[in-house]
Amino acid sequence: MSAVGGIWQSLTNQPQIGISTMVLLTDGTVLCRGDDDTAAGGRQWLRLTPTAAGTYVDGVWSPAAPSSNSRRFYASAVLADGTVLVAGGEESDGGADLNAAELYDPKTDTWKTLPTPSGWTAIGDAPCCVLADGRVLLGSIVTTSTAVYDPLHNSWSPAGNKDDRSDEETWTLLPDGTVLTVECDNHPKAEKFVPSQNRWVSAGTVPVDLVQASSSEIGPAVLMADGRVFALGATGHTALYSRPPTPDLVGTWLAGPDLPRDANGVQLITKDAPAALLPNGHVLFATSPLAEGSVPKGYPGPSHFFEFDGHAFTALAAPGTSGSPAYAFRLLLLPNGQVLAANGTSDLEIYTPDGSPDPAWAPRIVDCPKVISAGATYRLQGTQLNGLSQAVSYGDDATMATNYPLVRLVRTNPTRTWYCRTHGHTTMGVATGSAIVATTFDVPEGIEDGAAQLEVVSNGIPSEPVTITLDSAPVVTNGSGRPPKTGCLARSSVAVSLVGLVLVVLARLIT
């Protein structure tokens, strides 16, 4: 295959430590964990901030508060309020398969300790998934138990038992709210979690085995724009899943194309490897050669990168860091449609894909404020604000989904971009179609007066912009230390005030 597709480029400013798991915060910055075997390094976190022009390749690094525990290979998720949940750790300063969880608040740059599921003794490298209602589903690597975390009550409750342990599994959120997984203990069987019934049901049998028996490892699984799930195996096989009309029914599996071989004729596999859904609808993923020997448990390099267009693979030029095995890589889809790639070193690269998204995939703004003031908070409504997919996947841990809206303000001449911190999304689902959903956004200080474009971005795809007016004047507090309600939030308050005034006038007239 000839190498075509997008281009790779190194960051202009590289971090001073190695980087592994990364999550996209709702203010457009990227929170990254330092990949270091030492306890201090394992607790270290950095934030990558895009430039004023909105570029990440020239972005700036700054320290974030260290977490209480060091951890490698763990569950992670951005919640609907913009905070970040991390749980477990196959390796940590608290021992193997850490049974601990923390929550990071980007607004205050602080961590707080969270409870863990009752009766659990290990979380380790468990898979997790944020459900459409904002709760977090977590799997046990020891038993068939699963649990759900409720951020509103800071508590865990039992979920249904699985057919097998969750160890090494990859979980994918579907448009009907269910969570799909291929079983690694009982392969080639598959299961789904149905939140409305709080139970796991069969998702049939995969026609090709995606799980490497000697290691119980599997690859990523990505929901594509056409509604199918593309699941990659640690065996060189792939499969495609189509959901049924009713959530608790089985659905349909078909064998996908087998992964190619490298120049030496060795089978390429996606064993604990990353993937990301690109704005052009293709799936970017990393592979490594199958380890030689009768029991192929190893993780050899180098890595080879491909795009899958729903039918066939396209080989890509390799980044400068491709000497490492695929399991070391993490891929994070950025708001500008690029993909940030880290492999545990301090050399990060960005992939810029070619092509463009189908306009039907874009978020659409239905209602938003027309005047935006610095430091104020607003509500925005629209359709498909959460995107069509979680868009980022990995072969079990390193859960780094991006299915939540970001709000971007853009001025031209010269170009200046501000990201607003979003929170309070009405859903954390995917492919919500024509349903009206909403998010709240906080405008940063330091915006400039004048006309600008407001966009909602999800999965790296922007909405059609809305022309608004920026007001740089700081918001005056109402005496309680809080800013007054403004914009869309203010409309209801104004309406209530007018109704109250009318009632007072009527009362006086009657008396």
Image (cartoon, rainbow, N blue to C red):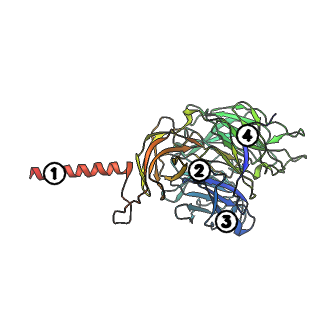
User: Which amino acid type is shown beneath numbered disc 4?
Assistant: Leu
The residue that label 1 is drawn on is 505
The residue that label 2 is drawn on is 54
Q: Residues within 10 Å of mark 1 (few under 14, many from 20)?
A: few
Closer to the N terminus: mark 3 or mark 4? Answer: 3
The quarter holding residue 187 reads top right
Q: Are marks 3 and 4 in contact (CB under 8 Å)?
A: no
Residue 297 at x, y percent in the picture = 84, 50
Residue at the image position 69 percent from the left and 54 percent from the top: 141
| Up-down relation of residue 463 to residue 105 (above or below) | above
The quarter holding residue 357 reads top right
The residue that label 4 is drawn on is 232
User: Which amino acid type is shown beneath numbered disc 3?
Assistant: Gln
User: Which amino acid type is shown beneath numbered disc 2?
Assistant: Gly
> Disc 2 vs disc 1: which is toward the camera?
2
Residue 307 at x, y percent in the picture = 72, 37
Tell me the SS state at disc 3. Answer: loop
Q: Quadrant of the N terminus?
A: top right
Q: Residues within 10 Å of mark 3 (few under 14, many from 20)?
A: many
Q: Are marks 2 and 3 in contact (CB under 8 Å)?
A: no
Tell me the SS state at disc 4. Answer: strand
**Can residue 208 be spotted in the picture?**
no
Tell me the SS state at disc 1. Answer: helix
Q: Are marks 4 and 1 in contact (CB under 8 Å)?
A: no
User: Which amino acid type is shown beneath numbered disc 1?
Assistant: Val
> Disc 2 vs disc 3: which is toward the camera?
2
Closer to the N terminus: mark 2 or mark 4? Answer: 2
